[in-house]
Amino acid sequence: MIKYTSSKQVSIDDYLISHGKKLNPENRWIKLTSLMPWDNLSSVYLKKMSKKMGRRAIAPRIVIGAVIVKHLKSLSDEETIEEIRENAYLQYFLGLPEYTYDQVFTPSLFVTIRRRLGEREFN
């Protein structure tokens, strides 16, 4: 089951990381965040999801962002999740409201995403 709300990005000034530090607005992931058609990409992803059945899904922005990170950085599933865990800029790119060291999802979910979307949409 999926419940979708628009991918409204928290402002860079409101994004919280440890010890009151702020993100650099010139970072490549910060710049890419504003260029991405998040709602359009989410609509492709949502067409493959049930709105009535199953447990609550990971937010489309997080899933799509993780797939983009995986491909742009040429990482394995496990490396992608670890890279996201360690990097506040990547977490901002994924739409998280603040930095967390928690995994956004388990690496094995990439297998389900690939199967659900199909190779063409995934790539």
Image (tube, rainbow, N blue to C red):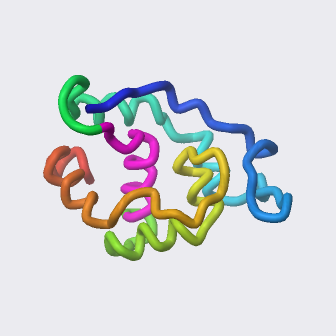
In this picture, residue 50 sits left or right of residue 26: left
Q: Any magenta on residue 75?
A: no
Residue 54, position as x, y percentages in the image: 20, 36
- Horizontal and vertical percent for residue 49? 22, 33
Along the horizontal axis of the image, is 55 left or right of 34? left
Instruction: Describe residue 31's horizontal placement relative to residue 69 as left or right.
Output: right
Quadrant for the N terminus in the image: top left
Against 110, is 60 above or below?
A: above
Residue at the front extreme of this rendering: 55
Residue situated furthest right in the rendering: 20
Q: Give the residue at x 47% y 73%.
A: 82
Residue 116 quadrant: top left
| Residue at 58%, 66% in the rendered image | 101
User: Which contiguous range is marked in magenta?
Assistant: 56-70
Q: Is residue 76 above or below residue 68?
A: below
Task: Work out whether residue 47 or residue 104 is closer to the camera in this orientation and state it.
Answer: 104
Q: How many marks?
A: 0
Q: Main secondary structure of the magenta part?
A: helix
Q: Is residue 62 magenta?
A: yes
For image coordinates 59% across by 49% down, the residue present is 32
Q: Is residue 23 above or below residue 86?
A: above
Q: Position of residue 41 (x, y in %)?
A: 38, 36
User: Which residue is painted at 51% across and 65% down in the image?
Assistant: 84
Q: Is residue 69 left or right of residue 10?
A: left
- Residue 89, percent across and down? 64, 60
